[in-house]
Image: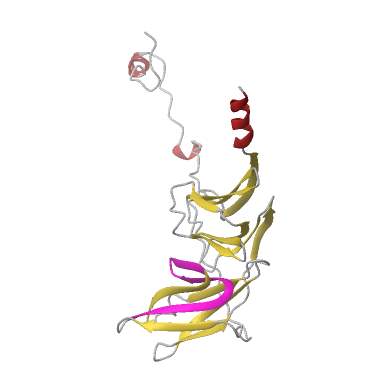
Amino acid sequence: MRPRAGSLTLAPLALLALTTCAPARSAPPREAVAEAAPAPRAEAVPAPAVREIDGAVPDDMVVDFRRRDAARSMVSVARDGYLVALLRGKDVVAHIDAAAIEVRHRDDKDAPLVWEVTHPQTMETARGVIHFDIDGRPHLRRAEPPTPVGRVESGRAHRCQAHEGALGGFTVLCRVPGGASVAGVTGVDPGALSWVAPAAGAGIARFDLPARPDSVDARVLGYSDGMTGVLVRIEASFLPGEERASLAMLSSERQQPEMRRFFHHRFEE
């Protein structure tokens, strides 16, 4: 019977070598044995610094808060017609016109509260931070705009662009037609860090991809344009041996079946 790989059939050969008259051969020194170096583990990349700058906050931006108890408040930021996002720690919320997030008082030094507002048509994004005074009241401040990442992905009726996430990883913004939907590919709940909001008859989608070490996070955005179905895949990966996380955006199209012609053909038969 043919021995299986990894079985114990090598043991008799070792015993035979010990009983022969041939002089024993010394094992090579340990340092002479070439060993494959383990792949370096991906290290977490710190979030980019959010640097405040001088400049007035847009006049139509409104910040408000409601105290829940002695330690927590609900902070909201509004700007009509814009996609508003609030980010703090691992928490991200985004909605058209206004967004709200729960914060604890007087801890913004350890976890800055960041706001971003995006114009649905131009997708131009402004960024800033929120500070709290001694009474816990919030105040808006401007910050440097986000740094673009990668190329723009545009297709039949969509346009996607990305920038460095305020809390690390990547933020992807897509202008899409109405009726677009989002799904997760790698087990991540797409509803946790993805939003699709209607805006002036179309829509704007936001994806926040943490790009954690040893991870792959992929989302798909789908929509129909006439009889053509379009799928946009957005993927952030940070694998062992890589120096930094990478982002990929690509799209594909497929002609959908025309049900009217199908039924017409069947009725003629």
Q: How many marks?
A: 0
Q: Quadrant of residue 51?
A: bottom right
Residue 110 on image: x %, y %: 43, 76
Q: Residue drawn 33% across and 20% down?
A: 8
Q: Residue drawn 49% across and 57% down?
A: 43
Residue 190 higher or lower than 110, as above or below: above
Image position of 126 (left or right of 19): right
Residue projecting furthest to the top: 1
Q: Quadrant of the C terminus?
A: top right
**Which sits in the foreground, 226 or 37?**
226
Q: Quadrant of residue 58?
A: bottom right
Residue 25 higher or lower than 180, as above or below: above
Residue 15 on image: x %, y %: 33, 17
**Which sits in the foreground, 218 or 147?**
218
- On the question of residue 82 being in view, the answer is yes
Residue projecting furthest to the front: 268
- Secondary structure mostly seen in the magenta stretch: strand
Image position of 212 (left or right of 72): right
- Magenta span contains residue 85: yes
Residue 159 on image: x %, y %: 67, 57
Residue 101 higher or lower than 198, as above or below: below
The range drawn in magenta is 72-95
- Magenta span contains residue 81: yes
Q: Quadrant of the N terminus?
A: top left
Image position of 145 (left or right of 74): right
**Which sits in the foreground, 167 or 199?**
199
Residue projecting furthest to the left: 69
Residue 217 on image: x %, y %: 50, 51
- On the question of residue 171 being in view, the answer is no
